[in-house]
Amino acid sequence: MKVHVRIKRFNPEKDRRPYWADYEVPTDPFDRVLDVLHYIKWNLDGTLALRRSCAHGICGSDAMLINGRNRLACKVLVKDLGDRITVEPLRGLPVIKDLVVDMEPFFAKYRQVMPWLVNDEPPPARERLQSPEERARIDDTTKCILCAVCTTACPIFWGNGEFLGPAALVAAHRFIFDSRDRAAAERLAILAERSGAFKCRTVFNCTDACPQGIEITKAIQELKQAIVLSRA
Amino acid sequence: MPVHEYDAVIVGAGGAGLFAALELSHQRDLRVAVLSKLYPTRSHTGAAQGGIGAALGNEEEDHWEWHMFDTVKGGDYLVDQDAAEILAREAIETIYDLEHYGLPFDRTPDGRIAQRRFGGHTHHFGQGPVRRACHAADRTGHMILQTLYQQCLRNNVHFFNEFQVVDLLLEDGVAAGVVAWEILTGELHVFHSRAVMFATGGWGRIFKVSSNAHTLTGDGAAICWRRGIPLEDMEFYQFHPTGIYRLGILMSEAARGEGAILRNRYGERFMERYSPNLLDLAPRDIIARAMITEIREGRGIDGKDYLHLDFTHLPRQVLDEKLPEITSFARTYLGIDPATQPVPVQPTAHYAMGGIPTDVWGRVIRDEHNTPVPGLYAAGECACVSVHGANRLGTNSLVDILVFGRRAGRDMARYLKEAERVPVAHNPDSDAREELERLRNSTGGEKVGAIREELAACMMEWCGIFRNGADLQRMLDKLGELRDRYARITLDDRGWKFNQDLLEAWELGCLLDVAEATVRSALNRTESRGAHMREDYPKRDDAQWLKHTLLYRDGRFAYKPVTITRFQPQERKY
């Protein structure tokens, strides 16, 4: 089947402002949108810029706005979109070229929440013990692939670039509720600040958009509760 | 041209590169840079699914000697056994290290690291399957990548993201740095350092159907080859049995570890005929050949070129809890619920056993006498230690990147205590600049995508699971033709900023190089061993070929003996 693809293009070396470009692409219903973009790039216009790597939803490179929703181009199929596909760069991050946005602000927020296990007690000769129940507590938030789909779907983030955003909060959750970690208090203090967890207004855009199916809003609510309890 | 001064430069930010960087970060006086063509968390280590093998014995009796034996036998006795012993022993402490760094392994009821079965991993030297693969659901690689990256951030490792390394600087045979291209600006940078490590991963993209990321184009191996380093055992390339039909996306071996079964068009469990003992958990080379044999004899599904991976007898809970990722792949890409419908699969190009030759400390060697290149290191899939020999066992890629990434980091720290800074030549970036200018300005009308597509299709056909002399020669001739066309490409994008058109053109040059090394080595080895199956030489020939291939870019071969310590070569049966 033929699909009509509109892509928001911008080349900083040539264009003063972004513009829409249109392409007709022969596809199979089971093609990924990434396959469609590759077809354009390899057959119609080699100047198209987009990030991608694994092509099956694991590496988190190819997040973009597809038919008005944030998704991974390698995880949505043509058959689920119909014969008109519109592709734009993620919102809320500066556009570098075409579908490539500047990820540095996103990763800077990730680094702010101390996204690493802290436990400086001398480790045992073997593994630290953790029960299956304790492990299950963090299962959902360990799935995050840092694709930025959630943060750039969040209207609070669009309005306030200072907000840590859902992805950084998910990273904080993954460590705060890990039974082996010892830095929950420090992280909760960071999240309690003005641009932290309480900026979330439970819009659920993040949860709806997450390609890993993480219950992000729920995780953020758990963080808010933990902050309140830590003050009590 | 910006010049950066570092003590060590690590190229690649997957498991091997990050573990080496983490080891070096414990030495506070050393300046270490990690250069990645991607963002580190995009590295392909993250795609590893099922598990990492280590004889912890948490679920049942296990010993590192059994793991070592399985590794040696799995590699069809081409494995260097001193290296395999290190792999199996140090896997254990490496797993504990990772756990202490925060890796969220699945747990046994008593809180230990949970383990499951995987292909080719056995108890009592081949008696039957053993639970050895430590796992975090089927996201084990993802969790390894995240954990190592996180600890590197904690220790303030310097990352240069989206920097494509395009050349290695060797001064009088000593590593002196790299030339890297900043993708964002198009600018070339020189990284002047006392040690250089390549951890750039594999090159599955030389084949049409592959589990590998688009960015796995053999860059590190090609760069070293161009600078006079030989490549080792390039004829040994692994096809994973269960890639999703046409897409090549992996259905982890953990699927079969948890009980999934391969079936042909008659619903027959055909592995009973090929490996009566280990069945669907035989090593990958054996299963991949069995599948192609079934397909060739007309027993593919509907007579076509795929088979079924059947989960339908498994409880839904197993799919949801132990295999959630691959369950979701089947749903997303095929619209199939594996609990009720079998998944169409075919072998998919997966893993390079060969690569940049190193010793057991990750030091790159330049010849059959194991002469090291001072200051140059390699680890992970781009390297060949050799712990995988002629065929890698499932989970051992993760073990390899971690054990030898860590060792390379430790040895670099030792080396840097003594090593002097070697000055680099005037205009160290001139070769790289010339090559990129040539690609940018060439006007012959040929298209990069078309050449790459033809390369991958022909490699699949003539240098895939079954090989013969005539097909390999045909492939070598084809490579000559493709190289001619590559010299006449025309790019659409002549800009500087984020010019991926140019990037893909440069990557294609690497693909052509590693494909050529693969084909030449395959044509040269007139025997069948592990993943290298020659229809015209169907037997293993220890008298002639119990040795490693070293191939130089000028076409010259040299050979290295296989190190044999505990296990004498035997016929390989499962």
Image: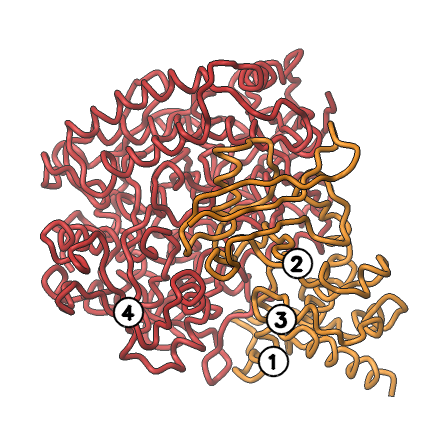
Chain colours: A orange, B red
Which residue type does callout 2 highlight? Answer: Gly
| Residue positioned most to the right | A194
- What residue lies at 81% left-to-right and 86% top-to-bottom? A229
Residue B342: assigned label: 4
Q: Residues within 10 Å of mark 2 (few under 14, many from 20)?
A: few
Q: Position of residue B132 (x, y in %)?
A: 36, 67
Residue A31: assigned label: none
Which residue type does callout 1 highlight? Answer: Arg
Which residue type does callout 4 highlight? Answer: Pro
The reply to whether discs 4 and 1 touch (Cβ–Cβ < 8 Å) is no
Q: Which residue is mark 1?
A: A137
Q: Earlier in the sequence, mark 2 or mark 3?
A: 2
The reply to whether discs 3 and 4 touch (Cβ–Cβ < 8 Å) is no
Q: Position of residue B331 (x, y in %)?
A: 42, 67
Q: Which residue is mark 3?
A: A141
Which residue type does callout 3 highlight? Answer: Thr
| CA distance separating discs 2 and 1 | 33 Å
- Please tell me which residue lies in front, B464 or B388: B464
- Apparent side of residue B67 relative to residue B172 in the rendered image (left or right): left
Q: Which residue is mark 2?
A: A68
The reply to whether discs 2 and 1 touch (Cβ–Cβ < 8 Å) is no
Q: Residues within 10 Å of mark 3 (few under 14, many from 20)?
A: many
In the rendered view of the protein, which quadrant contains the C terminus of chain B? bottom left
| CA distance separating discs 2 and 3 | 25 Å
| CA distance separating discs 3 and 4 | 30 Å
